[in-house]
Amino acid sequence: MSGSSVTGQTVVITGGAGFIGSHLADALVETNDVIVLDDLSTGARENVPDGATFVKGDVRDPATVAEVTDGVDLIFHEAAVVSVEQSIDEPEFCHDVNFDGTLQILEAARREDARVVFASSAAIYGEPTSLPLTESEPVAPQSPYGIDKCSADQYLRTYHDLYGLETVALRYFNVYGPRQTASDYSGVISIFREQAQAGEPITVDGDGTQTRDFVHVADVVQANLRAATTEHVGTAYNVGTGEETSIRTLAETTQRVTDSDSPIVHRDPRPGDIAHSRADVTKARQRLGYEPSVSLEDGLATLVGE
Ligand code: NAD
Ligand code: UD1
């Protein structure tokens, strides 16, 4: 799906210099007036496409947010501290960015009567009672990150119900793809790939039987574009693939597709880690017309070829 379904709008992408936000900016920049707000804490200026206006600033700062959102039609709110592990190390800082930052964006949207599409997370579900996870699964987050995403997700619905704001929360599962950089707090695919290509041990936390639903960033962009125009607002959608992969299998697949001699080593399990995760995407399929299109095997192969 191209960016052509969203045209002629003034669009703010918070976190638009980051992994997911910059792919969204790419999809929108040709047919819209795109403004990226990012503090470059993990993002990179060079990820922002030519033609987009870049503002270096913090989503927690009301004056910056007011200036950037003046006259906006549509806001994609991607800026956040994305690591579950970092939120356990630094709960107060993560709460400020992930919760207070989101409230700043919602208030700006209320002033401007702008639509907000929010990067929510599968982390809000915590340990599932059954799989696959539907949106009606009870929320039971088990990390500060999950709690803040959960509150923000509920705030979006409430801003729709109370103020008539057009809001959509997209509950991303585990997103991967080009421009996801490896660091201690990055997504597992970027870490395993870097380890394998450097010939370093691939570090599996715990026994590696924990599972995730890995979704390619192209499909996440697709879901965002559809959420930007749907009439079904004031609600949340899972964005995954419906497939589940264990971390041990991921490590072995990474070894194979990178043709790496790296050994797989096991470390202690990660505190607050979720054992299993797999999306039911029926709601997004039916109401948004979302269709996941990239298999993990193909997605990993493309990454390695980069
Ligand atoms: P990322 O770290 O690449 O992107 C986040 C961006 O936000 C970065 O460019 C960073 O510099 C910016 N940022 C952070 N704090 C900021 C602040 N206070 N003010 C302004 N900008 C700030 O990570 P990503 O994977 O692209 O994540 C994008 C969004 O998707 C996040 O909200 C994340 O929680 C959510 N999400 C990601 C995944 C995943 O698997 N990657 C899954 C579920 C949800
Ligand atoms: C990820 C996202 C989070 C998102 C959530 C949605 C990142 C950094 N986190 O969290 O923003 O909201 O998905 O489901 O993108 N692991 C290893 N070895 C490593 C690193 C990780 O075994 O070197 C394991 C972890 O213990 C965990 C799994 O891989 O079991 C996934 O970890 P991670 O990529 O950090 O993602 P989540 O915590 O699921």
Image (tube, grey):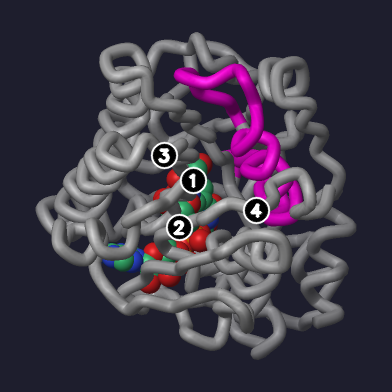
Percent across and percent down for residue 225 are 67, 43
Label 4 or label 1, whichever lies nearer to me, is: 4
Residue in the image at 26% along x and 64% along y: 67
Task: Inspect the image, locate mark 2, and give the three-letter code of the amino acid beneath it.
Answer: Val
- Mark closer to the chain start, 3 or 1: 1
* Residue 211, above or below 262: above
Which numbered dot is residue 197? none
Q: Are marks 1 and 2 in contact (CB under 8 Å)?
A: yes
Res 65 quadrant in image? bottom left
Q: Among all residues in the image, which is located at the extreme left?
A: 92
Residue in the image at 37% along x and 35% along y: 113
Task: Inspect the image, locate mark 1, and give the three-letter code of the amino acid beneath it.
Answer: Leu
Which residue bears the numbered disc 3?
A: 114
Which residue bears the numbered disc 1?
A: 74
- CA–CA distance in space, label 3 to label 4: 14 Å
Which residue bears the numbered disc 4?
A: 8
* Residue 280, above or below 57: above
- Mark closer to the chain start, 3 or 4: 4
Label 3 or label 4, whichever lies nearer to me, is: 4
Task: Inspect the image, locate mark 4, and give the three-letter code of the amino acid beneath it.
Answer: Gly
Q: Are marks 3 and 4 in contact (CB under 8 Å)?
A: no
- Mark closer to the chain start, 4 or 1: 4
Percent across and percent down for residue 36 are 45, 68
- CA–CA distance in space, label 3 to label 2: 10 Å
Q: Which residues are magenta?
A: 209-238
Percent across and percent down for residue 135 are 53, 16
